[in-house]
Image (spheres, rainbow, N blue to C red):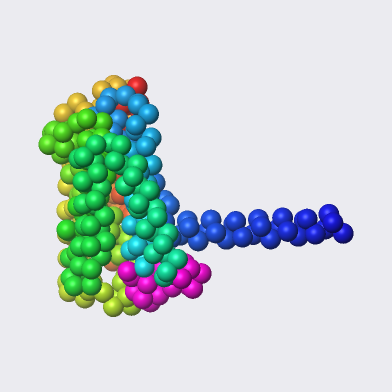
Amino acid sequence: MKQIFSQMVGTEIGGMVSETLSILTRLFRVRLASLVALSTLSGYLFAAHGFAPPAVLTTLAIWLLAAGCSALNQLQEINIDGRMGRTRSRPLPSGELTPGHALLISGGVIGCGLMLLMNGGQTPLLLGLLAILWYNGVYTPLKKKTAWAVFPGAICGALPPLIGYSAAGGSILDPAAVILAGTLLIWQVPHFWLLAWRYRQDQLDSGLPTPFRQISEERLFGINACWMAALFLCYFLFILFGMISNTLLADIYLALLAALLLASSKELLRGAKHASSGHLFHLVNLSMALLLMTLFFDNLG
């Protein structure tokens, strides 16, 4: 009987842990927070040209800030998330987590992130505070006002690599830092629009202003193609200006980048009516992952 009871208790505890992890994974949007953290680490190594223990603290700090800001964003948009099929299973609209608990968790996680970021110096801390204020204080409310909030919102994506770069002692005005941050900034636009395109019915159901109500799909598709062209041009700048020092790694990067460009071009040539938004979305994300991983291994030590 004692063994059966122990098994029951163990199963119940295991279930609670699993459920908690599931809630936090969705609340923090772990994959997105990890990509943000990777951009910070790449920025740090890009400036330091080698690994140092402070890189871990800076990367963890930004992961916590990204996770905490995501939780706060979901609290701000709980009603909007509840109207969209893609987001209504998140912890707040689904009722798995109360707004009070979400606020407590987000505040605690953001606070921990800022405390860790203080070790990197004044500039990383100020940029971290700017990222929080811009994402939750400017971009999130602005989405309710205009369909073009993605443009000022893209600044949020440019800040993490600058935080990593400055934490390693580099100046955020260095040409390398500007190119890296600019590439992340440009990437934000096709990333957002292709996700919105993939779930455009959700966009229409959300009640938010959306480009799909203001311009034709063909025109929006063409505008997005221009942003993707600008993005791939930025990727090639890292080769053009010799910012990838390892020759073999540069060759691999160039070959994979060309393959991604070819696949993206082939999809874009199919036009707005026939192109796969999901396929393009994954290609755009793969291209950014390729850049960040290349910079990571090139500057690892």
Query: Looking at the image, can residue 286 be seen?
Result: no
Residue 137 locus on image (x, y percent): 23, 62
Q: Residue at x 59, y 57 (%)?
A: 18
Query: Looking at the image, can residue 118 be seen?
Result: yes
Q: Residue at x 37, y 72 (%)?
A: 78
Which quadrant, please, contains the N terminus?
bottom right
> As displayed, is residue 195 above or below residue 237?
below
Residue 59 locus on image (x, y percent): 35, 40
Is 48 part of what is drawn in magenta? Answer: no
Type of secondary structure dominating the magenta stretch: loop
Residue toward you, 11 or 255? 11
Q: How many badges with numbers are in the image?
A: 0
State which region is magenta: 76-98
> As displayed, is residue 72 above or below residue 256?
below
Q: Residue at x 33, y 70 (%)?
A: 77
Q: Is residue 49 left or right of residue 152?
A: right
Q: Is residue 83 left or right of residue 212?
A: right
> As displayed, is residue 189 above or below residue 37?
below
Q: Residue at x 38, y 42 (%)?
A: 60
Q: Is residue 246 left or right of residue 238?
A: right
Which quadrant, please, contains the C terminus?
top left
Is 94 part of what is drawn in magenta? Answer: yes
Residue toward you, 287 or 75? 75
Give the residue at the far right of this rendering.
1
> As displayed, is residue 136 above or below residue 301?
below
Residue 107 locus on image (x, y percent): 37, 58
